[in-house]
Amino acid sequence: MAETVTLWVYRGDQHGGEEKPYEVPLMPGMVVLDAVHWIQAHLAPDLAVRWNCKAAHCGSCSAEVNGRPRLLCKTRLDEFVKEGVPVHVRPMKTFPIIKDLVTDVSWNYRVMRQIPPFQPREPAPFTLYQRDVDRVQEFRRCIECFLCQDVCHVLREHHEQEHYFGPRFMARLAELEMHPMDAGDRVGFIRETAGVGWCNITHCCAEVCPEAIEITNNAIIPLKERVADRYWDPIRGLFRRFQKTAP
């Protein structure tokens, strides 16, 4: 195994920047975040990177390694060394750059505040069956790393943030919609405001999720089905038309 590895790390801010090479001593089990910390300690103390737990639980160290959205603390360097490919570390493309590897993800929190909250059918405590818990528990694993938001082409390439909430919030809406004790009706909101129709089911969000949440299959597709049932089912449409014309 090579004794050193060269990382090409993006340095810059909202006004522009470029990748700069840094040679880092390679140690067994080293992850990209370790290398970035070594660069901070020995070569570039002003290098900006966001991190917290270094255990793939906080979702803070999201960035892109060789063009793929990843957690820096979960990306081992030896996979690149064995393949003999250079290591390029850049900030998430979907969000505005603050400095170096740090991006402004505040848009996501503004979106979260728009989602209608949980509306219990009856006062707590209430009884839930395990099968119902299992259905929504998957979405609770989200660590809000926003890698799924970063990889989503609707947000990343087409910049349709005004029309589509993105996969992270499709999972949040699915969590609420599938909760057996929730009485809220969000189908119209999901169609019009959250923009579920913008997703064309590429599964890229699920592929980069560090918690292996099946965002496309278990959240987005069921939400699309609920919207289709309400707005495009011919039988329901005929019934709605009859209701409008009834005296």
Image (cartoon, rainbow, N blue to C red):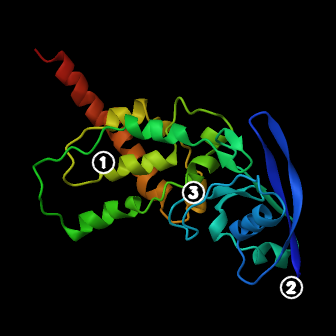
Residue located 29% across and 42% down the image? 117
* Quadrant in which the C terminus appears: top left
The amino acid marked with disc number 2 is Met
Residue 110 marker: none
Residue located 25% across and 68% down the image? 131
CA gap between label 1 and label 2 equals: 50 Å
Provide residue 135's location: percent of width, then percent of height: 32, 63
Q: Which is more N-terminal, label 1 or label 3?
A: 3
CA gap between label 3 and label 2 equals: 30 Å
The amino acid marked with disc number 1 is Glu
Residue 60 marker: 3
Tell which of 8 and 67 is nearer to you: 8
**Residues tagged 3 and 2 counted as in contact (Cβ below 8 A):** no
Q: Report crowding for label 3: few under 14, some 14 to 19, many 20 or more residues within 10 A (C-alpha).
A: many
Residue located 64% across and 41% down the image? 95
Provide residue 68's location: percent of width, then percent of height: 71, 57
**Residues tagged 1 and 2 counted as in contact (Cβ below 8 A):** no
Provide residue 65's location: percent of width, then percent of height: 74, 60
The amino acid marked with disc number 3 is Ser
Q: Which is more N-terminal, label 2 or label 1?
A: 2
**Residues tagged 3 and 1 counted as in contact (Cβ below 8 A):** no
CA gap between label 3 and label 1 equals: 27 Å
Q: Which is more N-terminal, label 2 or label 3?
A: 2
Q: Which residue is mark 2?
A: 1
Q: Report crowding for label 1: few under 14, some 14 to 19, many 20 or more residues within 10 A (C-alpha).
A: many
Helix, strand, or loop for circle 3?
A: loop
* Quadrant in which the N terminus appears: bottom right
Q: Which residue is mark 1?
A: 177
Q: Report crowding for label 2: few under 14, some 14 to 19, many 20 or more residues within 10 A (C-alpha).
A: few
Residue located 41% across and 34% down the image? 191
Of tags 3 and 1, which is closer to the observer? Answer: 3
